[in-house]
Image (cartoon, rainbow, N blue to C red):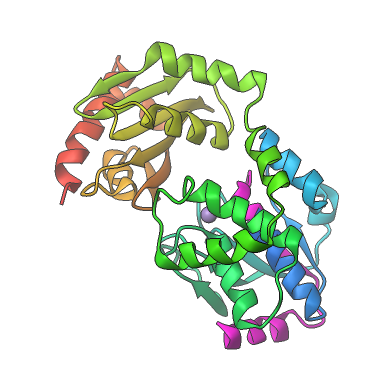
Amino acid sequence: MEERFEKVLKIAQGHTVCIQTHDYPDPDALASAYGLQELLRRRGIEAEIGYFGTVDKINIKLMMEEFDIKPMSEQRRKELAEDTVIINVDVQKNNSNLTDMRGMERVCIDHHPWVTNAEYDIVIHKIVGSCATIVTQLYEELGEEIPPMVATALIYGLKVDTRNLCSGVKDEDIAAFAKLHKLADHSIIQRLENSSLQISDLRAYGAAIQGIEVHGGIGFVHIPFDCPDGLIASVCNFILALDTVKIAVVYADRRGGMKFSVRSEERDVNAGQLISCALKGVGNGGGHYAMAGGILWAESVPLLGDNVDLAIRNRFGEALEEVRD
Ligand SMILES: [Mn+2]
C-alpha cells in the first residue's frame, strides 16, 4: 500500500484534489475522507472533502462539528477544473449512490466488493469491515502517528460500519480497532453514539413497529414515505434485533420507486446477492455479505401488480431459495 500511496502523491502534485465519498456519506465514509485528508496534508497535499446530497443525519452533523470537517460547497464543486484529481473513498465509480463530479476519478480507496468496471490509476482495495480500517493501515505503513481526532473519527466509522465489531469483521479490523482504541477520545464517541436519533426519525421507526411482517425468517418493513438512506439502514438494523428476524428488508418510497436496505445474519445468505437476485429486472442492488442496498425503479412498480408489498415479499422469498449456499 505504501508504494501505491506514493503514487497517489505524485498524481496529486500540482492539482486540485478532491476526496469524494458517496452521496449522503455515512460515518465510515466521512471518517475515512477526514483521515485521508490529514494524511495527505502531512505529505504536503491539501485536499478537500466533497460529496453530493445534503447531510441530514444528526450524527453526521455532529461529526462535522466535532472534527471541524468543512466539505466543499456546491458552488465550489461546480467550479472545479477538469483536471481536478478525485479520490473516491468508501465507494466505486458507477455506483448508484455516487454522483459524477467534475474532474478525473484517478484513485479509489474502498472496502466493498469490487464491482466497477471504471479504470482508476491507483486502487487501494481490501474486503474488510470498514474503509476506516484501510486508512488506519495506511498511517501505520507510512509510519505516521495517528492524531487523536483522526483516531476518534476512524474508530467511530469502524464501529458503525461493523455494528460494533459484530458484522463483516476481519482480523485487520480488530487490529485497527485495538490501535485506534488507545488513541481515540472516548468522550466524543460517546457523544456521537448517544445522538443518533432525531424526532423526525421516529416516524420511520413507527412505520416499522406498526407494519413489520415476518415471513420465513425475513422481516419486511415498507416505510411509506421517502427518508434518508442512513435512516432506512438504521430501521433495518433495528428490526434485525428481533429474535425471529434473521434477514431484514426495509424499503422506503422514493420518487415513484423504492429505496432498499437489506441485512443478513444468516451465515449462508449473502445480503448483496439476495437483493441483486430479488430485484433482477425491476431494479438493482448489491453490497456486502451482511449489508446491502438497492433501488426498485419507478417504471417497474406497475409490473409488480396491485399488491406491491406482496410481490416484493415473494421476490425475496424466491431469491432466498436461490442464493442460499
Ligand atoms: Mn464503509
- Which range is magenta? 1-30
Q: How many marks?
A: 0
The one of 47 and 283 positioned closer to us in this rendering: 47
Residue 20 visible from this viewpoint: no
**Is 148 on the left-hand or right-hand side of 226?**
right
Magenta segment: does it hold 233?
no
Q: Residue at x 64, y 86 (%)?
A: 7
**Whole-percent x and y of residue 193?**
63, 38
The one of 157 and 302 positioned closer to us in this rendering: 157
**Whole-percent x and y of residue 248?**
35, 33
> From the viewer's perspective, is residue 176 above or below residue 316?
below
The one of 104 and 160 positioned closer to us in this rendering: 160
Q: Residue at x 62, y 48 (%)?
A: 27
Residue 300 visible from this viewpoint: yes
**Whole-percent x and y of residue 325?**
15, 52
The one of 111 and 108 positioned closer to us in this rendering: 111
> From the viewer's perspective, is residue 44 above or below residue 171?
below
Q: Residue at x 54, y 50 (%)?
A: 159
